[in-house]
Image: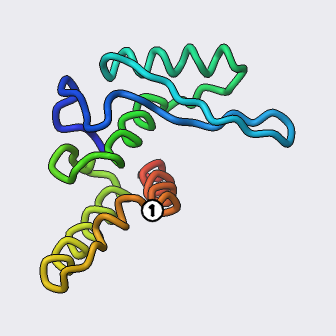
Amino acid sequence: MKLKDNKRAPVGGWYYKYTIKRGNLTFPATVYGESLDKLIANTKKDMLSNSYNVPEDLAWQVEDQICQRQPGDRCWYEPALGDTIASVIHGAAKLTDKVLGTKLEHRARGCSSCNKRRAALNKLS
């Protein structure tokens, strides 16, 4: 997903989380920035200083993770396969929430395995 306005501070602020693995140990890492561009640059610096392989699509991963924490009106789906499928699922969940009073869309937004699947499908397109 992409932010509709990447100059506007997101809900919760500009931060990105990832996990550093060293042997059998894992360490959580959180990187902050004053803007999207600064956050991406700081994340890249942090990863390099921790001998972490910087992914080619780091900018997309940072923006996508930020969108996972945002209200539905702050981001849009790219015209990629995974995002298209996710858009349909979120639309159906939103409609179900209105009709039945459930919280399906909120749960779908927080589904980490769903987000990994969506990202993998996007890389295929």
Q: Is 47 situated above or below 75?
A: above
Residue 68: x, y in percent? 36, 49
Residue located farthest toward the right when viewing the structure as drawn = 23
Residue 96: x, y in percent? 20, 80
Residue 69: x, y in percent? 34, 46
In this view, the residue in front, 92 or 109, is 109
**Residue that mark 1 sits on:** 111
The image quarter in which residue 109 lies: bottom left
Q: Secondary structure at mark 1?
A: loop
Image-based side of 73 in relation to 45, left or right = left
Q: Is 104 situated above or below 54?
A: below
In this view, the residue in front, 54 or 46, is 46
Image-based side of 35 in relation to 52, left or right = left
Q: Residue at x 25, y 79 (%)?
A: 102
Q: Residue at x 30, y 73 (%)?
A: 104
Q: Residue at x 21, y 47 (%)?
A: 76
The image quarter in which residue 87 lies: bottom left
The image quarter in which residue 85 lies: bottom left
Residue type at mark 1 is Cys
Residue located farthest toward the bottom when viewing the structure as drawn = 100
Image-based side of 24 in relation to 31, left or right = right
Q: Is 82 situated above or below 35?
A: below
Label 1: how many residues lie within 10 Å, few (<14), some (14-19) or many (20+)? few
Question: By what rule are the colours in the image chosen?
Answer: rainbow
Residue 34: x, y in percent? 32, 16
Q: Is 70 situated above or below 108?
A: above
